[in-house]
Amino acid sequence: KNEVEQSPQNLTAQEGEFITINCSYSVGISALHWLQQHPGGGIVSLFMLSSGKKKHGRLIATINIQEKHSSLHITASHPRDSAVYICAVPGGGADGLTFGKGTHLIIQP
Amino acid sequence: GAVVSQHPSWVICKSGTSVKIECRSLDFQATTMFWYRQFPKQSLMLMATSNEGSKATYEQGIEKDKFLINHASLTLSTLTVTSAHPEDSSFYICSAREEQGAANSPLHFGNGTRLTVT
């Protein structure tokens, strides 16, 4: 089973700061997911990537397959970015996912 | 874009009663859906894989008679928590892939159901 570690577990930053969230996994994968869980619980898929880098608005996700590591960056952070960010990799059942514990991000005005 | 609708968003029930949670894919067909459970401050844990027209596949430690899954159509899967107890209180969330059997296809989540058993 793939082990997923995220860091930091909690992060509080000021509006405008550059944010980095890290994810490491133990077994080679075909793709990695970054998810955003809102305070109410709903989950949005931010990225699915298998190599290199992807960018969407102020969000950037990178992955290094050889090092089994991925990062999620937020540029010019805003209070509305406050959420739990979860890294997930294949495993945990047929076509299911194994999730990291998430990073609780709070952006203060 | 593809949307997964989950209902209800929250439910409070008495111990011993059963609760049904619905998960619908609104604009795509999902022969496979996934049910997860999340306890406070914990990560999502896969409970079972729901397969249209066949039996669900349960993860180790999940009682199939306790958590009944029915996937009778290509757009609807239901999870019934039978004889609920306070320890079943949790956040339940479903997901489905746009392309069946493609591990790299986008994954869409419902908004989750917060179950409280009193």
Image (cartoon, coloured by chain):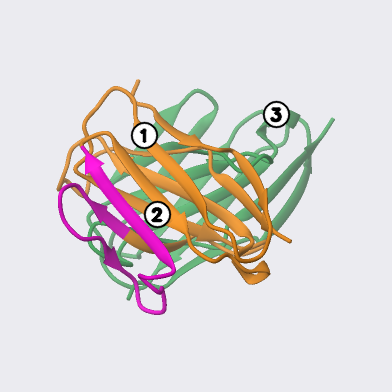
Above or below B44: residue B78: above
Whether residue A24 sits left or right of residue B97 in the image: it is right
**Chain B: what color?**
orange
Q: Secondary structure at mark 3?
A: helix
Whether residue B3 sits left or right of residue B43 in the image: it is left
Residue that appears at 25% across and 60% down: B56
Circle 1: residue type: Arg
Whether residue A29 sits left or right of residue B36 in the image: it is left
Identify the image quadrant of the C terminus of chain B: bottom right
Q: Nearer the viewer, residue A20 or A94?
A: A94
**Which chain can be seen in green?**
A
Q: Residue B105: image x %, image y %?
A: 23, 40
Query: Can you tell which of label 3 and label 1 is closer to the viewer?
Result: 1
| Spatial CA span between label 3 and label 1 | 28 Å
Q: Is residue A77 visible?
A: yes
Chain letter, disc 2 residue: B
Circle 1 packing at 10 Å, graded few (<14), some (14-19), many (20+), is many
Q: Residue A9: image x %, image y %?
A: 66, 61
Same chain assignment for discs 3 and 1 = no
Identify the image quadrant of the N terminus of chain B: top left
Which residue has dot 3 on it?
A80
* Mark 2 in CB contact with mark 1 (< 8 angstroms): no
Residue that appears at 61% across and 59% down: B90
The residue segment tinted magenta is B49-73
Which residue has dot 2 on it?
B35
